[in-house]
Every structure is written in structure tokens, then in C-alpha cells.
Amino acid sequence: MLALPSPLSLPETLTGSLRLTPEQFAEFCSANPDAVLELAADGSLITMTPTGGDTGARNSTLAFLLQLAIRSSGLPLKLFDSSTGFRLGDGSVLSPDAALVNLDRWQALDEVERRSFPPLCPDLVVELASPSVAAGFSEGVGTPRGLTALRRKLTAYQANGARLGWLLIPEQRAVEIWGPLAGSAESPRRIEPAARLDGAPLFPGLVIDLEEIWAG
């Protein structure tokens, strides 16, 4: 079993050279339960950092509003939070800020698959950009921290079968809508300013008001 000392320390040289299978990654996470990591399709580790207070509060609001929207719509969807890793078809293990999975697809998994990283791509994924308040990022003044990385993740979800993706950018009160992949890479549709999100026609009745999220 793979294991590292606690607290976990991953030098950049190790992070760039270490390659794991999804099974090894699951063992690694079990041995290092405090680690916050994702697995890229090439087997490399993606290190993640805790969010700031504003983003953490927005994530909580997002999950609450999504749960209300699911109940209101009556759609057979199951909600997962940002701590859930999904094993995608390309071998990566990624954790959206929020994810919705059709109930039939979830119930089709066996007990072992549910306890581990579910081997499926969510039907709807949501990513929430963080403010660019930390040093060491060079995406430009006023640009949300990690926006480029989040777009790469949305592209990966899209390529692995996600039906819909939402990228929320609070600093700009904007949303990028990532539709299903149709033969070639599809560019996202941008809404700015955005006041609400509507999952129709793929998820009719799934509507959330964004003002609470923008407020932080």
C-alpha cells in the first residue's frame, strides 16, 4: 500500500513525477485521509488547497440551493458535495464543487462502487471560482484564482460524458454554461450578469437564484 508520512508533504518534483492508477490513488487516499487531492488522466496527482471563507460560504449556499431545486423540480437526481471524487472514463478522479447524478445511474452501482470513487461522470457538474486574493497566481488582476484550471476540469467532464456544466464566477457575477460534447469541443456559453440558472431543457424545473451566492 502506498503511504506518505503525516502530515502529507508532496514536493513539486514528486508531484510531477509520481504516476498512480485509480486503484493506487484510492489506496493512497485511504492511507492519507487528510490529503486533498485529485488524479489527472495521466496518473499524476493534483494538489488542492482549502478554500477561503467567502468561497466556503458560497459552496455551502450552492449545495443548499441545489437541494431545494431538486426537490422543487421532482427530478430523480442525487446531489454530491465537493468532497466526492468521481472516477471518470479517462482514468482521472475529479471532485466538482457540486455534482448531480441521475438516481438510476447511482442505484445501478454496487455497494463497493458507491463506497469508493463512483465510476461514472456526473450528469451535471458545478464549479465555483475563488477570488484572486492569494499570491503566486498570474492570471491577471481581478481574475478569479484557478479559473484556467477550472475550465480544464469542465472540458474533462464534458469529454467524459457530462450532460451539463456550470462554472460560476462570483467576482464577475458571471456563469459559463458547458453543454454536452457533440463530436468536437464545444465552447461554453457565457451569461453576464447572471441572476439565475435554469437546467432546462436537459433538467427541466431545476432553477436556482444566484443572488445569494453572489452575496457570499
Image: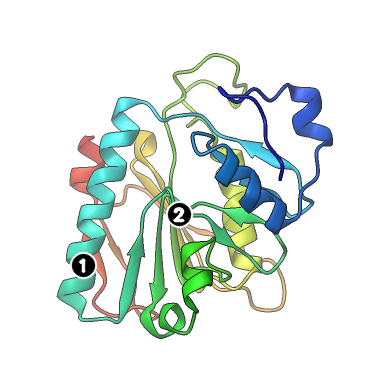
Residue at the spot 27% in from the left edge and 53% down from the top edge: 63
**Could you tell me residue 180's position as x and y percent?**
56, 73
Q: Secondary structure at mark 1?
A: helix
Q: Is residue 139 left or right of residue 134?
A: right
In the rendered structure, which amino acid carries the disc numbered 1? Ala
Mark 2 residue type: Thr
Say which residue label 1 marks: 69
Residue for point 53% across, 37% down: 36
Q: Is residue 66 left or right of residue 33?
A: left
Q: How many marks?
A: 2
Residue 152 is at least partly visible in this image: yes
Q: Which residue is mark 2?
A: 84
Question: Which quadrant holds the C terminus?
Answer: top left
Residue 195 in view: no
Q: Quadrant of the N terminus?
A: top right
Instruction: Where is residue 186? Give x, y as percent.
Output: 63, 66
Q: CA distance from mark 1 to mark 2?
A: 20 Å
Of label 1 and label 2, which has the lower sequence position? 1
